[in-house]
Image (spheres, rainbow, N blue to C red):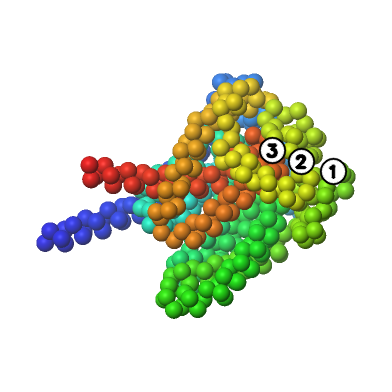
C-alpha cells in the first residue's frame, strides 16, 4: 500500500514537473514584454537619457537602422500595397519582419516588436530545457540551467530592441536540440531530429546568411570522418553489441549528410575579396578553396579593425592579422581563451564608445564571473552525463563558432553578443548538472 502511494506521488510530481516545462516559457514570454517596456519607457528615456535615441531605442545600435527603414517600408505598403514588401529587403530580415508587423498593426513603434522578441526568447528557453532533459537532467534543474540564457542583462540588446540575434539564437538551439536526439530510439525521433535540423538552419539562414557556409564546411568534414569511423568500427561495434553507440554514430552520419545538403542549398555564393590586399602566403598542404576562404577571413579581420570599427574602444588583438593558413591554427588557443573568458578585469567598469557601451561594461563583469564558473563546471558535467558523443559534437560546434566570431570581429561588443547562445548552452549543461549534484549531496548530508 505504501509503495502504491509513493508511486502515485512520484507520478503526480512528474506530471507537475512536465507542466512546469511549458509554464516556464510562458513566464519568460511575459518577462520579456515587461522588461522590454521598462527599458523602452523608463530606463532609456528617464534613467539613462544620454543613451536614448528616441522611441525606446538604444543609441548607437542597429535598431535605429531597422526601425527607420521599417517605418519607410510600412508607409509604402499602406500607400502602394503589399507588392512593396519583401522578407529580406536590402538583405535584412529584421526590416522585412518589422515592416510587416508595423504595417499589420498600423503602429510604427518599437514596442510592438516586444511580442515577437518574447516569442523567440521563450521558445529558445524551451528548446534549451528540452535539450538538457534529453541528457537525463530533470526538468526543474534544466530550468535552473536555462536561467543565464533567459536573464543575462546583455540579452536586452535584442530582447528589448529590434535585432536578429533572437532569431539566430533560436535557430542554433533548434539545431543543437536535433543533435541531442541521435541517441533516441525509433525512426520518428530521427525524422524529428532532421526536421529540427532543417528548421534551425533555415532560421540561421534568415538571421545570418553568411553563417551557413561554416556549417556546410564543418559538416562536410564531420560527415566524411563519421562515415569512415562507422565503416572502420562497425564490425567491432557489432561484435561487442554496442547497439546504442552504433545507432548514435549512424544517426549522426545521416544528420551530418542532411546538414551538408540543406546548407548547400541555402549557402550564399562565396565572393573573393579584391579591394584589399594583405600579405598572404599560400601553403602547399592547404587546398586552394580553403586557402581562399581563410584569406577572405583575414581580409575581413583587417577591414574590421582598420575600416569598419577603426578606433573603436572595444577592439582587441589589433596587431594580429593572419598571413597564412597555419596562423589560424596557431591562434586557436588564444582565440578560444578570448571567446570563452573575455572580457577580463582590465575591461570592467570602464568607459565604452557610447553611453550604452559604458552601461554594458558595468553589467558584463557579473555575467562574466557566472560564465567562468559555468565553463569550469562544464568539465564535470561532460564527464558525468550520459551520451557524451552528442555533447562532444555540441561542444565542438560551440568552440568552433566562438572562434570564428573572435577571428572575424575582434571587438568586445560583437564577441559577447554573438557567443551568447554558445556560452548559454555550455553553462546550461554545467549549472543544471552542478545544482542537481549539490541537491543530492544536501539530501545525503
Q: Can you give x and y, in whole percent of width and height, for residue 262 in the image? A: 66, 65
Judge whether 44 appears above or below 375 on screen: above
Q: Nearer the viewer, residue 177 or 18?
A: 177
- Mark 1 and mark 3 lie on one chain; the one further toward the N terminus is 1
Q: Give the number of the disc on residue 278.
A: 1
| Residue 111 seen by the camera | no
At 36% from the left and 44% from the top, the residue drawn is 435
In the picture provided, is 50 more to the left or to the right than 299? left
Callout 1: helix, strand or loop? loop
Q: CA distance from mark 1 to mark 3?
A: 17 Å
Q: CA distance from mark 3 to mark 2?
A: 11 Å
At 65% from the left and 63% from the top, the residue drawn is 221
Number of residue marks = 3
Q: Give the number of the disc on residue 321.
A: 2
Callout 3: helix, strand or loop? loop
Residue hosting label 3: 410
Which quarter of the rendering shows the N terminus?
Answer: bottom left
Judge whether 232 appears above or below 142 on screen: below
Q: Can you give x and y, in whole percent of width and height, for residue 283 in the image? A: 79, 55
**Between marks 1 and 3 in the image, the one whose residue lies nearer the viewer:** 1
Amino acid at each position: 500500500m505504501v509503495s502504491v502511494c509513493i508511486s502515485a506521488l512520484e507520478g503526480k510530481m512528474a506530471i507537475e514537473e512536465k507542466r512546469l516545462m511549458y509554464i516556464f516559457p510562458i513566464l519568460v514570454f511575459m518577462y520579456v514584454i515587461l522588461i522590454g517596456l521598462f527599458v523602452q519607457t523608463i530606463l532609456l528615456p528617464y534613467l539613462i537619457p544620454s543613451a536614448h535615441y528616441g522611441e525606446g531605442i538604444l543609441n548607437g545600435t542597429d535598431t535605429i537602422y531597422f526601425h527607420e527603414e521599417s517605418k519607410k517600408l510600412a508607409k509604402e505598403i499602406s500607400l502602394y500595397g503589399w507588392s512593396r514588401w519583401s522578407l529580406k529587403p536590402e538583405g535584412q530580415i529584421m526590416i522585412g519582419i518589422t515592416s510587416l508587423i508595423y504595417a499589420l498593426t498600423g503602429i510604427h513603434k518599437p514596442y510592438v516588436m516586444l511580442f515577437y522578441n518574447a516569442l523567440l526568447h521563450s521558445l529558445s528557453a524551451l528548446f534549451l530545457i528540452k535539450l538538457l532533459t534529453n541528457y537525463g537532467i530533470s526538468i526543474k534543474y534544466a530550468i535552473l540551467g536555462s536561467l543565464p540564457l533567459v536573464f543575462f542583462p546583455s540579452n536586452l540588446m535584442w530582447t528589448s530592441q529590434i535585432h536578429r540575434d533572437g532569431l539566430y539564437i533560436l535557430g542554433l538551439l533548434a539545431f543543437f536540440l536535433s543533435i541531442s536526439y541521435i541517441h533516441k530510439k525509433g525512426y520518428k525521433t530521427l525524422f524529428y531530429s532532421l526536421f529540427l535540423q532543417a528548421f534551425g538552419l533555415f532560421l540561421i539562414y534568415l538571421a545570418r546568411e553568411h553563417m551557413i557556409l561554416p556549417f556546410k564546411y564543418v559538416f562536410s568534414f564531420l560527415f566524411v570522418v563519421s562515415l569512415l569511423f562507422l565503416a572502420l568500427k562497425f564490425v567491432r561495434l557489432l561484435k561487442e553489441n554496442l547497439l546504442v553507440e552504433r545507432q548514435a554514430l549512424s544517426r549522426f552520419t545521416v544528420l551530418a549528410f542532411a546538414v551538408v545538403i540543406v546548407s548547400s542549398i541555402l549557402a550564399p555564393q562565396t565572393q573573393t575579396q579584391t579591394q584589399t590586399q594583405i600579405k598572404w602566403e599560400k601553403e602547399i598542404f592547404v587546398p586552394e578553396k580553403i586557402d581562399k576562404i581563410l584569406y577572405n577571413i583575414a581580409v575581413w579581420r583587417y577591414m574590421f579593425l582598420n575600416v569598419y570599427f577603426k578606433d573603436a574602444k572595444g577592439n582587441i588583438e589589433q596587431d594580429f592579422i593572419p598571413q597564412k593558413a597555419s596562423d589560424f591554427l596557431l591562434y586557436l588557443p588564444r582565440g578560444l581563451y578570448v571567446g570563452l573568458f573575455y572580457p577580463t578585469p582590465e575591461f570592467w567598469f570602464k568607459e565604452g564608445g557610447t553611453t550604452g557601451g559604458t552601461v554594458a561594461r558595468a553589467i558584463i563583469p557579473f555575467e562574466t564571473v557566472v560564465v567562468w564558473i559555468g565553463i569550469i563546471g562544464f568539465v564535470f558535467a561532460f564527464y558525468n552525463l550520459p551520451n557524451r558523443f552528442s555533447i562532444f559534437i555540441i561542444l565542438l560546434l560551440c568552440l568552433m563558432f566562438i572562434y570564428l566570431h573572435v577571428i572575424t570581429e575582434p571587438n568586445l561588443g560583437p564577441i559577447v553578443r554573438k557567443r551568447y547562445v554558445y556560452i548559454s548552452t555550455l553553462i546550461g549543461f554545467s549549472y543544471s548538472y552542478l545544482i542537481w549534484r549539490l541537491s543530492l549531496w544536501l539530501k545525503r548530508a
